[in-house]
Every structure is written in C-alpha cells, then in structure tokens.
Image: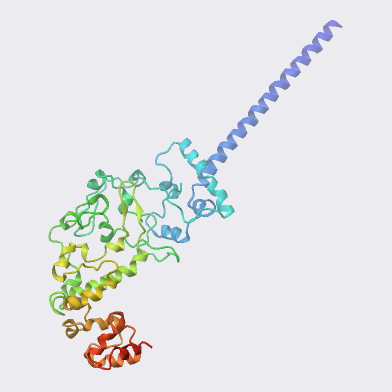
Amino acid sequence: MRYTGAREAGVGASSNSGQSRASSATRIVTAGAALVATALFVVLATVGTSTNWFCTQPCHVVHADNTKTFGAGPHSLVSCVACHEPVNASPIVFLAKKIEVAPDLFTTVAGTFEMPLNAGSAVAIETPDETCTQCHDLSTRVVTPSDGLLIDHAAHTKRGITCTTCHNRAAHPESSVTYTLPGNSKHEDWLTMTACFRCHALDEPPTALFEAPGACEVCHTEGFDLVPASHDAPDWYAAFGPSGGHAKAYLAEASRTAETSALAAPEVKHPAGPVLPPAATLNECYTCHAKAFCTGCHGLAMPHPAGFTKSHGEAGLKTPKVCGRCHARNASEARGRGFCTACHHPQSTPERAWRTQHDEVVAKSGATACFECHEPAYCSACHVRGPEAAEALLR
C-alpha cells in the first residue's frame, strides 16, 4: 500500500509539472504572438500614417490648393515625411515624432484643427537645409542657372542663408499653377528677380535682408543686357522732353505695383535676419536707380511720400512744369497747370484750353472739385460778379 501510494504521488507530481510547463509554454507563445502583433501593428501604423493620403486627409487639415500644387510639382513622387520629418532619424526618434503629432488626428476629426497654420505649428516648420541636401547634394550637383545669371550657392550657404530663403515654393509650386483658392494669396516672387531684391537692394543705407551687394555684376554675367524693353521705346525721351517717356512707364509700373501689393508674400520673420518687406513694394524704378536719380531732374521726392496728396497743390502752383512732366496729357498741359484737370476734372479734354471749356465741365459735374484747391475768390479774377457768385456754384 505504501508503495502504491508513493507511485501515485509521483505520478501526480509529474502530471502537475507537465501542466505547469504547458501553461508556461502557452504564456510564452501568447506573449510572443502579442509582441509580434504589436510590432506588426506599429510597423503598419507607421507606414500607413506616413502616406501622403493620411498626412493630408485624416491627420492634418491641408488646403486643397496646396495638395494639388504639390501633385503638379516636381516633388509629387516624394512622400510628405521625407521633408516634414527629421532627416536620417532613428526608429525611436521617428516614432516619438509620430506620437508628438498624434493629437492632430483628434483635432482634425473634431473639426478644431487650427487654420491657417501659425508660425509655431509643429507642422508648419522651417525646412532645414539637410532636408533638401539629402537629395540635392550641392557638392556633386552641377548648377545650371538661366542665361546671364551667376548663382553661387556656396557664398549664400556661408552666410547662413537657407535653401528655402530662395526656393520657398519648391515643394508646393504656384508658378504657372492656377489652383489657388479664394483667400489664399499666391507667392508672386517665387524665384524671381523681385525676390532677389529682398537681399540685393540699392537703397542707402541698406535695409534688405543680409545687406547683400546690389551691384548688377554680382548676380549677372558681363555683357548681359539688363535694360527693360520699355526703355527702348521710340518715345522714351521724346514725349514731353527727356523724362516724358519714362514717367509714363513709371506710372504704369506703379499702378501694377499697387495692384499686386495685395498678392505679395506677407512680411516674414527670418530666423537669421530682420523682417522682409513685401516683395511688390520693391518693384519700381529704384530697383535699378538710386533715389537721387529721380530727384536730380524732378526736384521732388519720387515716388511722392505718403500724404503728398494733401500738399501737392502747393507744389503744383510753384513748379507746374515739374508736375506736368508726368501728369500732363499732352504738351500743352505740360507747359502750364492744365494737368490738374486730368484728375480733378477727368471729363475735360486735353485738346481744348481749360479756360474755354471749364464752364461746360462745371455745368455738367459741379464746381466742388474746383474748390478743393481754389478759394471762391479765385473765380472773381475773371467773373466780376464777385465771390458770392462763385460760392453759389456750391449750392
């Protein structure tokens, strides 16, 4: 009996040991399967959340025009994370970055994602140079600028100028693309000469970013023709004396500047320099000519300073021929003060003297515009009925 009991006890212990080993093996297999599943989920989630579709649809709110211009640009086959994630980051850093921006998914779903992206957003980050050079290696790349241009990338890099200072619309181009939505201004100065003048300006003292030299030969090859086509027009110096042609061209240019100022890139704070002025404000005669160039002939600050409209009447009385060089509609107006009618009485015609037609214009449009500059007594110089009659014209 004792032998049988001992044998049964041994069998029981052996059975319990076997069950324990089986249970441990099950736990190991389960844990291994869970670990593999977790790793697989992390890999798939990382890959899935790195696709351009996920970045621009469920995760971050991206303007439709930005998405479309990206697809129309040269980087359309490059993933978002190639530029918007740290370069050569370790898997741990890459995963940590994913976790950092994960809350954007919830704000997007909830409809509270901040738009437009502010400068401090984790998404709207400043693109570092290493992001660009991971593909565009300037040490081996042969740069071929357009004819007449000298582009020394090394000189810019040494001065801390980032790639995006010049190539600021490389990934999401807007040149020749018409996808911009209402309310989203196009960046008119993307890789244009106007953009270059943000740094390479001629003003004294220099106010541009980095105070880069403004001499033509700094950026252009010797012998390259920089004279605008308008300067070659036959009437450039012939219209109303030596300044008539260029005055017309300047006024047209100033008009275009005013029209495009609302479309220019807004003021941007660069990390290595001062605030950049809107590019459209640089698009004028002073691009090539120093400010003294105009003043030497005109005797007035050109372009006119702010508030000049309030005092321009005095200048018109003292130096009418100076004003007439730009504002007269024909040679006759340029010799006197007839140029005033171009603005104050646009219904008048330059072919007839103002003295013989002003009564027709006043009868048609009223005399209110006259008294913006003239005292009522001015009329009595010819109309001897007195200032009371002139004042009656306002009633």
Q: In which quarter of the view is residue 243 placed? A: bottom left
Residue 217, given in percent of the width and then of the height, sits at 15, 56
Question: Residue at point 26% right, 47% down?
Answer: 141
| Residue 325 seen from this side | no
The answer to whether residue 261 is above or below residue 135 is below
Answer left or right for 334 relative to 179.
left
Quick one: 106 or 6, which is closer to the camera?
106
Q: Is residue 48 visible?
A: yes
Q: Residue furthest top?
A: 2
Q: Position of residue 386 (x, y in %)?
A: 28, 91
Image-based side of 361 in relation to 9, left or right: left
- Where is residue 355? Give x, y as percent: 23, 90
In the image, residue 278 above or below residue 119: below
User: In the depicted view, which residue is nearer to us: 287 or 2?
Assistant: 287
* Residue placed most toward the observer, 389 or 127: 389
The image shows residue 81 at horizontal and vertical percentages of 44, 47
Residue at the farthest right position: 1
